[in-house]
Image (cartoon, rainbow, N blue to C red):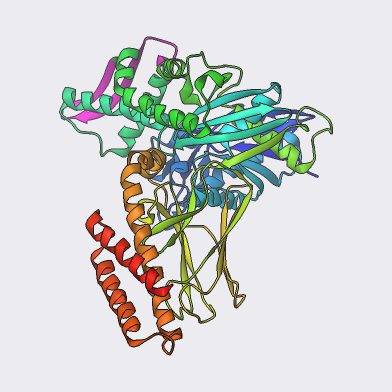
Amino acid sequence: MSKVIGIDLGTTNSCVSVLEGDTPVIITNTEGYRTTPSVVTFHRDGSADVGNAAKRQATLHPERTSISIKRRMGSDYRMKVGSHSYSPQEISAYILRKLKKDAEEYLGTTVTDAVITVPAYFNDAQRQATKDAGRIAGLNVLRIINEPTAAALAYGLDNGESQKILVYDLGGGTFDVSLIEIGDGLIEVIATSGDNFLGGDDFDARIAERISDEIKTKTGISIKKDEAVMYRIKEEAERVKKELSSSLSALVNLPFIVKTKDGPVSFETTFTRAEFERLTADLIEKTRIPVENALKDAGIPKSEISKVLLVGGSTRIPAVQNMITELMGMEPSRNLNPDECVALGAAIQGGKLSGQIVPGSAADNIVLMDVTPLSLSIETIGGIASRLIERNTTIPVRQSKIFTTASNFQSSVDVRVFQGERKFTRDNKLLGNFKLGGIKRALAGVPQIEVTFDIDANGIVNVSACDLGSGHEQSITITSSSNLSEEEIQRAIWKARVYEEEDDEMFSLADEKRKAEQIVKKAQRQLIEHKNDWDKLHRKEVKDNIQKMKRLLLKLKFTRNEAAADTVRSTERSLKALLE
């Protein structure tokens, strides 16, 4: 069997690794580098350059160059070059194909299988898009695993003693934090949180913004709409950011950056670390919330955390290291190379899945258990998000729940699948929907519809619904093309806490309304069933209460009208008494 490679498909740079014996090693690319820029430059004939070659051409052909495509995975974005149009999956496939070829040259054999990593907070569509990119690149993707989990796997290979660690992963375009417990050969993810739109690119953008503003002040020329000039500035901003990680100041040098009526003008200035830290303080602060959320979700005090692992190139920023030291009360560990450890962990997982690890070795004894980052639910009456799987549930997982119909003789139901932490679906993210038909005709509340959520080891969701009366079944693999926005990702969990009191009030009223509707339907059924048993006066009382309840329910439009809710409850009690 051919070797399985482990790939860290990064926003800024990607990395590939393979097991040699029981030790994962980084594969250098054909240019001799251990990481490959995640950059693709397309030519008008449909050919493309990838990696370092593409990065060198980006200034000349910015309109034909793709950078940071990972941020668009799972979306309907298309990059148009001449008559060609490229999806994020297709662009990512060029990067993966380059890594595959580098691995084949290194190994001297064909490579077909891979484990690819994704941010822990990637949603289902983004995970599916990553698998599709692998397939386009000619790879059989054995497993999609979370980046912080892969880093913990690389760390746990040589550090098997019982401990709880926090993985702080700030890459080029995404941020993740995971709490992981290691012990007795088990690596178990306890909780995860993060932001899919926060990373080194955002730090570069702050420097680039300042440089472009200073150029305008000096020359009077706005260059923000000039793609070629802005790419040069962003490239310089990235270099300055890296230099400031080891120096207190860095020289910005951009020769012949703009043309004026007097000829080309060069730009030069000095950027200090203090200025950089002022510009990016809010970005660093945004990483604090997911760390605190993960700790709270796990129910673990900071004092129980043995180590903090830094993953991703952006963790080299001194201000980032200072913040995590202050927050956690300990210096972060520097045992792992932040640029390479994710790929190393992916290679270990690949070796385990393919049986290429020596039985009884340290790697063979490790068992990996991951979690799903956000809760999954379906919509029920009143827009309620009825959860089937809670966030931070260990995967793979399968969970079923019985629902019923809302109307008499209903022959089909719409199953709408949501992701998020709020109690109402309007506040969560719609992942997908499907219709289940062929339901056996019956009064409302009689049919039994079993809905099953199944999350596989890749974190990809499958949902099925079955009418237990007729046996009709329908299912869907969630492949929604909508990408989770920054606000949806960052705020999904903490926003639920902020609005918890409001949600509880609204949920209580919705619950009262649902109960009242059920008692009305029950009363209507019993009116038919007991038309010959009940006397005229009793039937009239039941009918009057039904009409009163219907009028009240029309008025109670999920507002905080406690008086109306009290009347509903009072009428409900009256109806119940009449039906006993």
State left or right for residue 395 relative to residue 208.
Answer: right
Taking depth in this image into account, of 10 and 208 the one nearest to the observer is 10
Percent across and percent down for residue 12 are 48, 33
| For residue 314, above or below residue 489 | above
- Extent of the magenta region: 244-269
Give coordinates of residue 348: x percent, y percent.
70, 34
Q: Residue furthest top?
A: 248
The rendered magenta stretch, by its main secondary structure, is classed as strand
Q: Is residue 387 above or below residue 305?
A: below
User: Which image quadrant is residue 24 in?
Assistant: top right
Q: Name the quadrant containing residue 153.
A: top right
Foreground pick, 430 / 534: 534
Asked whether residue 437 appears in the rendered view, the answer is yes
Magenta stretch encompasses residue 428: no
Taking depth in this image into account, of 48 and 309 the one nearest to the observer is 309
Q: Looking at the image, which residue is at 26% across and 25% down?
A: 210
